Amino acid sequence: MRILLVEDDPMVADGIREGLEKAGFAVDHTAAAEPAESALELIHYDLAIVDIGLPRMDGHELIRRLRRRGIEVPILILTARDGLDDRVVGLDLGADDYMVKPFQLPELLARLRALIRRSRSATTSELSAGSLRLDLARRTASARGAPLELTGREWEILQQLMLATPNVVDKQKMVESLSEWDNELTTNAVEIYISRLRNKLQGCGVEIRTIRGIGYRLDEILLA
Ligand code: CA
């Protein structure tokens, strides 16, 4: 899942970015509202984290402009401890949730996941195929009733495949959704993740098929 972080304090931005990446999110970061506005018009993000105190155009104005243009990305705002008005104004303008600085990373992650879940109203919090179960709320996986250990990226890829099934996930789109601005993932890397996933999914009643020239598809298979 891809997140846009709009934060002008480099220390705060680095901390958030590092934490989110460890949790398996792809993060793009901008220190000002103007490039964020363009990015959100061009790229599909699962969520945007917007600091209110930004140079030139502030976070409120950014949210106002995005919503006026009908850009529906879930937005979580970051405000200072004494910024009660900031929160109220932000929510009124169309932000979905807020965090008061300083905050603990686990709480931020929990809120992000809740927001992303809510925004995917059509999907349930659990996906299943074969004996495989994906708990989107907890970001855990199990197969044949036992926990399945996945890295953040393996989790992301599996989730994309399961959300798409029975359709094919385009390999290039997969690469893009897992890449960040300054850290382009290669198709080779995706192939490696797929190969690791295939090993982990053996005997689970599912198979990741390669669709030549297009991408991958998750199929349920009948176990003998
Ligand atoms: Ca700031």
Image (spheres, rainbow, N blue to C red):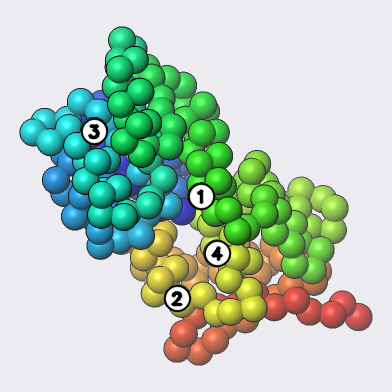
Relative to 19, does residue 43 appear above or below in the rendering?
below
Decide: few, some or many residues near mark 1? Use Cα within 10 Å; few <14, some 14-19, many ≥20. some
Q: Amino acid at mark 2?
A: Lys
Q: What's the distance in space between the residues labelled 2 and 4, CA to CA?
A: 11 Å
Q: Identify the mark nearer the N-term, 2 or 3.
A: 3
Residue visible at 44% across and 68% down in the picture: 174
Please identify, in this view, whether the residue under mark 4 or under mark 1 is nearer the observer. Answer: 1
Q: Are marks 1 and 3 in contact (CB under 8 Å)?
A: no
Q: Identify the mark nearer the N-term, 2 or 1.
A: 1
Q: Residue under circle 3?
A: 60
Q: Amino acid at mark 4?
A: Gln
Q: Residue under circle 1?
A: 119
Q: Amino acid at mark 3?
A: His
Q: Residue under circle 4?
A: 160
Q: Identify the mark nearer the N-term, 2 or 4.
A: 4
Decide: few, some or many residues near mark 3? Use Cα within 10 Å; few <14, some 14-19, many ≥20. many
Q: Nearer the viewer, residue 90 or 173?
A: 90
Decide: few, some or many residues near mark 4? Use Cα within 10 Å; few <14, some 14-19, many ≥20. some
Relative to 145, does residue 80 appear above or below in the rendering?
above
